[in-house]
Image (cartoon, helix red, strand yellow):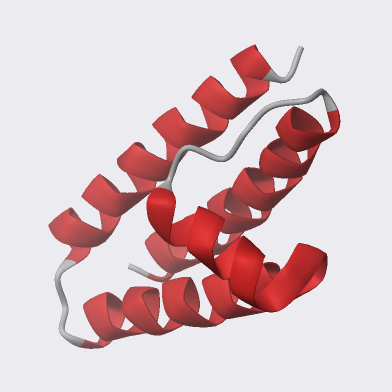
């Protein structure tokens, strides 16, 4: 279960990194929640908010002993990171 939480942290950082690469190449954030956070908190503020929310959600899933759901969230973020990296080329 701890491995799933570590994986979530790594995937969150990878999501942020690939998002920045995508945006540097002229891309536009398509997730309306993240786009709103970018507008409200600026270039780096949204990252802090995103990581706090994702960390809290991951910890809640870890604490409630729901490894399947935590791994499902990881699979979703793995897809997001993969997709960002494909578009950011």
**Residue 81 coordinates in the image, percent (x, y):** 55, 34
The vertical placement of 46 against 52, above or below, is above
Residue placed at 54% from the left, 82% from the top? 52
Q: Which of 40 and 8 is in front in this view?
A: 40
Q: In which quarter of the image is residue 67?
A: bottom left
The vertical placement of 23 against 13, above or below, is above
Question: Is 78 positioned to the left or the right of 87 in the image?
Answer: left
* Number of numbered markers: 0
**Residue 63 coordinates in the image, percent (x, y):** 25, 87
**Residue 37 coordinates in the image, percent (x, y):** 55, 68
Residue placed at 61% from the left, 75% from the top? 40
The vertical placement of 21 against 53, above or below, is above
Q: Nearer the viewer, residue 34 or 59?
A: 34
Q: Which residue lies furthest to the front in this view?
A: 39
Residue placed at 16% from the left, 85% from the top? 64
Residue placed at 70% from the left, 36% from the top? 18
Quadrant of the rendering where the N terminus is positioned:
bottom left
Question: Is 88 positioned to the left or the right of 10 in the image?
Answer: right
Quadrant of the rendering where the C terminus is positioned:
top right
**Residue 72 coordinates in the image, percent (x, y):** 23, 47
Question: Is 17 positioned to the left or the right of 28 in the image?
Answer: right
């Amino acid at each position: 279960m701890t491995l799933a939480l570590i994986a979530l942290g790594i995937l969150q950082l990878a999501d942020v990194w690939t998002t920045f690469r995508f945006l540097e190449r002229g891309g536009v954030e398509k997730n309306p929640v993240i786009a709103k956070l970018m507008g409200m908190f600026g270039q780096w503020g949204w990252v802090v908010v995103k990581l706090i929310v994702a960390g809290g959600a991951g910890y809640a899933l870890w604490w409630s002993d729901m490894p399947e759901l935590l791994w499902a969230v990881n699979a979703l973020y793995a897809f997001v990171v993969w997709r960002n990296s494909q578009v950011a080329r």
